[in-house]
């Protein structure tokens, strides 16, 4: 970014009382001292005089996991990333053991990444630690707010490595993984939130060796913020929405939740909803011989 501003000239051709206004030059901190000694033809402004984004200005509360409870989001919405990659939250290969989606009758609002207790964890992007304390269910938790509005949540830690209000750099150590809180075995429970709303992390990021962000500008619909239309046992089909038009068009494919009633069979449900048994089985990661129970929730895609 500095290279884009370095020696930027904004030429102002107007004059006041026949005296020309000096040309404005914006430079970085390293060049400021040297240039001001020899350059008398420009008004020089350092980059650090430009006000940064204040991500602590609103809803900055250390004591609660979600300070945005009264915030209303309008969809579709756009998220922006300045980088093409993120820093891996662990230093080994990322093995996702449980995905974002419906799991054992409950919403699983993040992904679980396998690790050994004591493995170091790292921030995915630059930001500021909003929360570093014990959270119900999540155990020892670090929440980092980033400059595009996202918050990354690192849960079930065994040790904190960052304090609240700490400024964090991409890839900086923030703690050690573990089994604190409601955890079944050692793993990192990674959650991606935007103003209190969870997002399927695999819609935004590729969890492989590339550490890729799927797009610098990506549009988000509610499909990617509702765990009940995803299955924690398999990765959802990812179709990246790159424009508002794409996002609106994607809404034509509708998903709904069907609650199994007493006496229901897959055949009866398929006929009632005008979908095939194969389609029901595929999206819910079940087989045609699976036993379905009253109260069970099935995703139906039309």
Image (cartoon, helix red, strand yellow):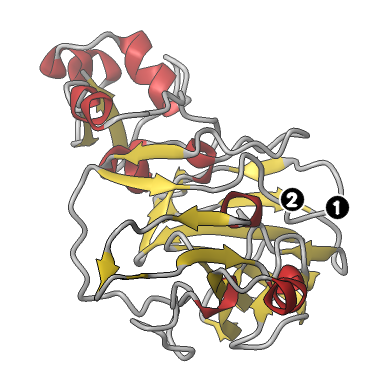
In the orientation shown, which residue stands out farthest toward the front?
18
Element marked by disc 1: loop
Within-10-Å neighbours for mark 1: few <14, some 14–19, many 20+? few
| Circles 2 and 1 in contact, beta carbons < 8 Å | yes
Residue 29 or residue 128, whichever sits in front: 29
Q: Residue at x 54, y 69 (%)?
A: 42
In the picture, the quarter occupied by the C terminus is top left
Q: Which residue is mark 2?
A: 88
As drawn, 44 above or below 206: below
Element marked by disc 2: loop
Q: Position of residue 134 (x, y in %)?
A: 59, 85
Q: Is residue 87 left or right of residue 234?
A: right
Q: CA distance from mark 2 to mark 1?
A: 7 Å
Q: Is residue 171 left or right of residue 269?
A: right
Q: Is residue 177 left or right of residue 246?
A: right
Q: Is residue 123 visible?
A: yes
Q: Residue at x 64, y 51 (%)?
A: 112
In the orientation shown, which residue stands out farthest toward the left?
272
Total number of numbered labels? 2
Q: Position of residue 97 (x, y in %)?
A: 67, 43
Q: Quadrant of residue 46?
A: bottom right
Residue 31 or residue 189, whichever sits in front: 31
Q: Is residue 55 left or right of residue 121?
A: left
Q: Which residue is mark 1?
A: 91
Q: Residue at x 62, y 35 (%)?
A: 206
As drawn, 5 above or below 166: above
Residue 20 or residue 231, whichever sits in front: 20
């Amino acid at each position: 970014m500095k290279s884009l501003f370095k020696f930027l000239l904004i030429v102002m051709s107007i004059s006041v009382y026949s005296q020309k206004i000096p040309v404005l030059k914006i430079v970085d901190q390293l060049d400021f001292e040297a240039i001001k000694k020899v350059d008398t033809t420009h008004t020089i402004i350092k980059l650090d005089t430009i006000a940064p984004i204040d991500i602590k200005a609103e809803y900055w509360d250390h004591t609660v996991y979600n300070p945005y409870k009264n915030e209303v989001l309008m969809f579709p919405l756009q998220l922006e990333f300045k980088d093409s990659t993120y820093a891996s939250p662990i230093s080994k290969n990322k093995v996702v053991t449980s995905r974002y989606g419906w799991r054992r009758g409950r919403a699983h609002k993040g992904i679980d990444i396998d690790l050994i207790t004591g493995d170091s964890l790292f921030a995915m992007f630059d930001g500021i630690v909003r929360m570093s304390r014990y959270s119900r269910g999540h155990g020892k938790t670090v929440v980092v707010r980033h400059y595009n509005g996202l918050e990354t949540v690192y849960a079930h830690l065994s040790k904190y490595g960052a304090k609240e209000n700490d400024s964090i750099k991409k890839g900086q150590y923030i703690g050690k993984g573990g089994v604190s809180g409601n955890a079944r075995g050692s793993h990192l429970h990674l959650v991606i939130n935007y103003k209190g709303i969870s997002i399927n992390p695999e819609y935004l990021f590729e969890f492989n060796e590339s550490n890729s962000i799927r797009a610098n500008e990506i549009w988000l619909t509610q499909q990617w913020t509702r765990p009940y239309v995803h299955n924690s046992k398999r990765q959802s089909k990812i179709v990246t929405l790159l424009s508002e038009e794409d996002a609106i068009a994607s809404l034509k494919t509708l998903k709904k939740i069907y609650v199994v009633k007493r006496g229901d069979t897959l055949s009866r449900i398929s006929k009632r909803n005008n979908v095939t048994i194969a389609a029901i089985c595929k999206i819910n990661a079940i087989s045609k011989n699976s036993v379905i129970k009253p109260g069970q929730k099935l995703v139906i895609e039309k």
